[in-house]
Amino acid sequence: MTRASRPHGRTTVRNWKPTAALLTAGALLTLSACSSDKDPAYNTKPSAAPPAATSASASPPLSSSVSPDQAAVLAVYAHYRKEQAKAYAKASASGTDIEKYATAEALGKVTRDVLSLRTAGNAASGAPVSQDTEVTALKTDGPIPKATIKDCLDVTGWKVVNKKSGTALPSPKGQLKRHVNDVTLEKWGNRWLVRTDTAKSIACGDSGASPSAS
């Protein structure tokens, strides 16, 4: 069933006041949006301009047991992650294709994140790496098909840097470098779109429940 409007909310950011840059696809990289190159804590030796974001990891080879719908869901997620990394690297969603892979709800989160980065004079360097990605729930009946993905998101090489100095900001204390990530998608018309992207406070390999598509 084709819908004319983008589902789930609006991307308006008016009256939203950035406090901490919620960077990473929800990856527990909570970084101070108030930090700048004027803060003595960050006056380490400046480096060159921040490198462009590398592509998020490509979709892993699909096994013969993966259905066409599952393959489509995984492909959209991989594209979403790649475009998200591009947006954070520029501190702007302009010039990216993030809108092709996200509902208004997910797009709104990315928009708020890049606004927080841009306001602080920061940007992201590198990209997250998705590992052990799998579709844990898939519901294709009903008016809106839904799916859930669980993966291990490695953010070791995904850092926030000051755009002026190129200096990387320190990671928050206790940040998990590899954590479980839950993503929900919905199918609108013939397109799967990411709806939510949620980091879990669970290290990869630890037990933890994933939500079901419902």
Image (cartoon, helix red, strand yellow):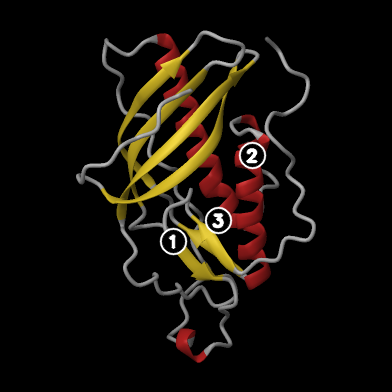
Q: Earlier in the sequence, mark 2 or mark 3?
A: 3
Read off the residue under disc 3: 89
Q: In the image, residue 157 lies at what x, y percent?
A: 36, 57
Q: Earlier in the sequence, mark 2 or mark 1?
A: 1
Q: In the image, residue 47 lies at what x, y percent?
A: 46, 76
Q: Secondary structure at mark 3?
A: helix
Gap in angstroms between the C-alphas marked 2 and 1? 20 Å
Amino acid type at image mark 3: Ala
Q: In the image, residue 52 lies at what x, y percent?
A: 51, 55
In depth, the one of 188 and 55 nearer the eye is 188
Q: In the image, residue 212 lies at what x, y percent?
A: 40, 27
In depth, the one of 68 and 214 nearer the eye is 214
Q: Which label number is shown at residue 160?
A: none
Q: Which label number is shown at residue 29?
A: 1
Q: Is residue 5 visible?
A: yes
| In the image, residue 174 above or below residue 70 | below
Q: Which label number is shown at residue 105?
A: 2
Q: How many marks?
A: 3
Q: Is residue 96 visible?
A: no
Circle 2: is it few (<14), some (14-19), or many (20+) Cα within 10 Å?
some
The reply, left or right, for residue 94 in relation to residue 48 is right
Q: Earlier in the sequence, mark 1 or mark 3?
A: 1
Quarter of the image for residue 114 reads bottom right
